[in-house]
Image (tube, rainbow, N blue to C red):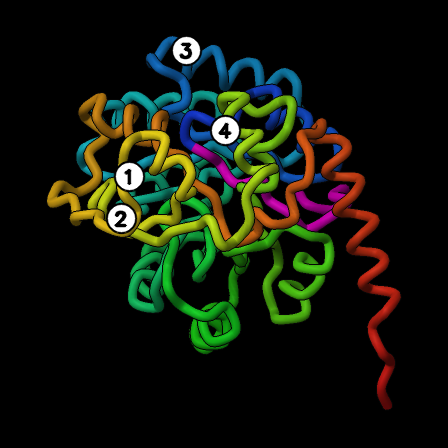
Amino acid sequence: MFDKLSLPVIVAPMFLVSSVEMVIASCKHGLVGSIPMLNARTAEDAENMLKELKKALPTEPWAVNFIAHKSNKRHDVDLELIKTYQPPIVIASLGHPGKVTEVVHSYGGLVFSDVASVKHAKKAAEANVDGLILVAAGAGGHAGTLNPFGFLDSVREFWTGYTILAGGISHGKDVLAAQIMGADFAYMGTKFIATEESAAFEDYKQMLVDTTIEDVLYTDAISGVHANFLIPSLLKNNLDPTNLKRKEESIDFSSMSEVKMWRDVWSAGHGVTTIKSINKVSDVASQLKKEYEEAKSKLIPVV
């Protein structure tokens, strides 16, 4: 499935940001594109989205993100759509991946589960997933706190399947480093928000160009779960980053509050510093490949 990739990179599915155009462009330029099922507002929209991706990408690996959380009102409907349209890869998030694994394996697809702790990695492994996405410190959106070196080493103690590393990866040399550390793929999101194909607001894209790692705040005050947000975005929404109170509610995909939160308050990972301009996905992919090859050529041979 992955023999034609130009780089071992999965473009992360981003709520309200990933678009069909972004997925197709990513895949056509040698990366694995992905999109959340819930970026389609209705089940009918989701079906049309899957039809379009399946037609445009008959041989390329692509993925959808499925929210396994009990609050996902479209859980059963989206799972049935996955069964019908058979995306090659399904990324399971925020819940036990057992049901989706059963469905996807029935047609020969792969299931990757994102995890932010060794405990969750073990649970996902027990559910017979094919890949673990290790969400380490510095990732955009809901991020973990673990150092990527220690996280990878700990998971490799019991895991032999696909391993995908997420967290602050934004340069070709980062992709190479992830491979050397033992990951099969690097998982990149923030870098692709600032692309022409992204569905993000133009102000959001420009904010990524204008900010650095110093403008990223890790807080549970917005969604009730720790995530990385841009401080200028908090200020824009009249939120004082020095005086935030923890939100008591947990993630809830059954209400519009979850949509409004991610629409109005903008997230970024620690790799935001490398974003200098808004580009096409094809240009980002080419630049990553160039950086990757340059970094590879600089490795010092040892005997």
- Which mark's residue is nearer the viewer, 2 or 3? 3
Residue at 30% over, 25% down:
259
> Of callouts 2 and 3, which one flags the residue occurring earlier in the amino acid sequence?
3
Question: Label 4, label 1: how many angstroms apart (C-alpha)?
Answer: 28 Å
Q: Toward the viewer: 95 or 88? A: 95
User: Quarter of the image holding residue 115?
Assistant: bottom left
Residue 59 visible = no
| Residue under pointer 4 | 204
Q: What main secondary structure does the magenta stretch of the protein show?
A: loop
| Residue under pointer 3 | 45
Q: The disc labelled 3 sits on which kind of residue?
A: Asp
| Residue under pointer 1 | 68
Callout 1: helix, strand or loop? Answer: loop
Check the image and report above or below for 139 versus 298.
Answer: above
Horizontal arrangement in the rendering, residue 45 relative to residue 288 (left or right)? left
Callout 3: helix, strand or loop? Answer: helix
Q: The disc labelled 4 sits on which kind of residue?
A: Tyr
